Image (cartoon, rainbow, N blue to C red):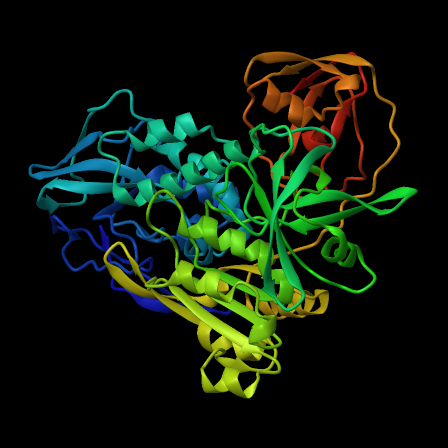
């Protein structure tokens, strides 16, 4: 048995509260409804955390650690059992311990950097821990009582159809998990609120992916401009509706549309602009700043209500991770606000009703150049979980008099630190200060601002993968040899489809048309969200791709190069 009190520890550049450091004991120890007497929690709400003694030997060998350096309680557990395994225990199983204590399995452990820090292994090993699943389990107290070293444990199964403990942390992190599987997990009797929080976020992300795959079209599709509005100095919004009146494709907040503009009689100019709205089911809105000599000037000067423009389906890898539970920092400058506005709307409309706290940071020259100020104000009115900070580089006297900005000057790391350094949040009844290094950052604006802020944040201790910046540059196209027709078998789903060259479909589009649900984001070979394995046949990527292993493909940018292929989807 092991108990602890919360303390602050330094992990990298972060100060984090933790109760993982425990002192082992033999007992007897009384276990009440809130857990072991004398044990206090830092963040986690569960009463008792347990792990098997066998896990100590297993992970010590796996990580090459001297087993004798891990005393009982080293993993942060309150009770160390022998002969209980995560692959055998199901959610809801009853454990009768000794003569009095009755516990119920309520959820798995979902590890964070505190565990890898405690074990002395790199944070990258979190993926190893999750994939394996042998990390112990949480228990609620059904009947209080004493626990002693050597007590017998009797396991009484309660819900034979519930998932095994080992399967749930994998589901937390499986970005391709179907929504039906996640819903089934959420409906399991006896599952506690803590794992439900992660499952709800994963369900939200799964549904988001499914929406993004609906009603997509290939090639160009005609859209008519239905309204035009002024948003700020030299910024206009254009609302577009499909000429054929068929539904528009779903998209992930932050993605863009590709336009073919007849800026010259002899050729078409292709440009991308972010979708600046979210939630409209029959139209898209883009918001464009006029730049002299560019395609945006043509758009401002020539486009009127009723004009028809060819448009490609939404794309882009700069998207909101709706499955994350971390605080979110939005940082934009000028017209860079457009994708972040869509993200803000999506974030505030999360269906589970509980959203992580956010900080909304925007920079403009002055109020006349500040696009969507009133729209953002209306969105976050009366939202205690949103902090808003506005920077004006050249505020007018009226801007200063009426308090239209919070800061005078440009955005820099030094100017951001005072309000991103930590976040007081309520986590399962515990008020804790989360360091800014564990947040998700979304940055859109001038390239130099994006580059400098990302470099500074990573130097400060933010994981590089948590700093998201916008880029419209797609991978380079390449000439490929493809077959005219191929039979494509999706091995995991058990479905088979015929791919035809004349249909001009990627393998991802063929999968979606066949009812195969898969993760995707940018749809142009950049983000690797759709990466999977090919087990038979040959494919060609129609763009230059990097960073995938042998036997892996990016279905969004792949076409068959043999008459038959098998993909692990």
Q: Position of residue 436 (x, y in %)?
A: 47, 67
Quadrant containing the C terminus in the rendered view:
top right
**Residue 52 seen in the figure:** no
* Residue visible at 72% across and 40% down in the picture: 309
- The number of callouts visible is 0
In the image, residue 223 sits, relative to residue 322, either above or below, namely above
Q: Answer with left or right where residue 433 lies relative to residue 217.
A: left
Q: Quadrant of residue 216?
A: top right
Q: Position of residue 386 (x, y in %)?
A: 39, 64
Q: Nearer the viewer, residue 201 or 312?
A: 312
Q: Nearer the viewer, residue 220 or 251?
A: 220
Q: Answer with left or right where residue 534 lies relative to residue 427.
A: right
Q: Position of residue 346 (x, y in %)?
A: 46, 48
Q: Nearer the viewer, residue 491 or 495?
A: 495
Q: Answer with left or right where residue 539 lies relative to residue 396.
A: right
Q: Quadrant of residue 142?
A: top left
* Residue visible at 18% across and 40% down in the picture: 150
């Amino acid at each position: 048995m092991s108990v602890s009190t919360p303390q602050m520890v330094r992990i990298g550049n972060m100060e984090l509260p933790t109760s993982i450091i425990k002192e082992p004991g033999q007992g007897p120890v009384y276990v009440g409804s809130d857990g072991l007497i004398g044990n206090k929690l830092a963040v986690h709400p569960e009463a008792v955390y347990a792990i098997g003694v066998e896990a100590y030997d297993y992970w010590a060998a796996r990580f090459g650690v001297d087993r004798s350096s891990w005393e009982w309680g080293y993993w942060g557990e309150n009770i160390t059992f022998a002969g209980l395994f995560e692959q055998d225990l199901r959610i809801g199983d009853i454990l009768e311990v000794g003569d009095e204590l009755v516990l119920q399995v309520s959820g798995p452990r979902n590890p964070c950097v505190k565990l890898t820090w405690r074990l002395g292994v790199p944070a990258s090993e979190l993926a190893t821990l999750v994939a394996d699943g042998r990390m112990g389990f949480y228990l609620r107290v059904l009947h209080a009582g004493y626990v002693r070293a050597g007590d017998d444990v009797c396991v009484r199964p309660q819900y034979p159809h519930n998932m095994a403990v080992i399967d749930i942390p994998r589901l937390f992190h499986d970005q391709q998990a179907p929504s039906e599987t996640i819903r089934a997990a959420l409906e399991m009797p006896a599952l506690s609120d803590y794992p439900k929080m992660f499952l709800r976020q994963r369900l939200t992300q799964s549904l988001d992916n499914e929406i993004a795959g609906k009603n997509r079209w290939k090639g160009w599709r005609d859209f008519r401009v239905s309204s035009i509005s002024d948003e700020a100095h030299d910024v206009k919004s254009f609302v577009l509706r499909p000429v054929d009146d068929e539904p528009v494709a779903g998209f992930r907040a932050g993605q863009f549309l590709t336009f073919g503009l007849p800026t010259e009689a002899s050729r078409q100019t292709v440009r991308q602009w972010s979708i600046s709205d979210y939630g409209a089911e029959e139209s898209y809105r883009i918001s464009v700043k006029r730049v002299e000599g560019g395609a945006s000037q043509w758009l401002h000067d020539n486009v009127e209500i009723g004009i028809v423009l060819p448009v490609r389906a939404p794309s882009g890898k700069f998207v909101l991770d709706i499955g994350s539970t971390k605080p979110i920092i939005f940082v934009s400058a000028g017209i860079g606000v457009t994708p972040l506005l869509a993200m803000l709307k999506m974030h505030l409309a999360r269906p589970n009703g509980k959203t992580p706290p956010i900080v909304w940071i925007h920079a403009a020259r002055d109020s006349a150049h500040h696009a969507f100020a009133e729209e953002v104000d209306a969105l976050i009115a009366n939202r205690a979980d949103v902090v808003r900070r506005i920077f004006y580089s050249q505020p007018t006297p009226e801007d200063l008099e009426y308090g239209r900005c919070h800061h005078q000057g440009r955005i820099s790391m030094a100017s951001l630190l005072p309000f991103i350094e930590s976040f007081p949040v309520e986590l399962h009844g515990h008020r804790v200060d989360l360091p800014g290094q564990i947040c998700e950052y979304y940055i859109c604006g001038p390239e130099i601002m994006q580059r400098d802020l990302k470099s500074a944040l990573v130097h400060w201790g933010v994981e590089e993968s948590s700093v998201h910046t916008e880029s419209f540059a797609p991978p380079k196209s390449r000439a490929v040899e493809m077959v005219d027709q191929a039979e494509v078998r999706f091995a995991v789903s058990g479905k088979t489809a015929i791919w035809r060259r004349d249909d001009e479909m990627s393998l991802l589009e063929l999968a979606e048309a066949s009812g195969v649900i898969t993760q995707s984001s940018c749809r142009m070979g950049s983000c690797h969200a759709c990466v999977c394995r090919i087990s038979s046949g040959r494919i060609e990527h129609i763009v230059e791709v990097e960073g995938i292993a042998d036997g892996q493909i990016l279905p969004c940018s792949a076409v068959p190069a043999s008459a038959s292929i098998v993909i692990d989807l």
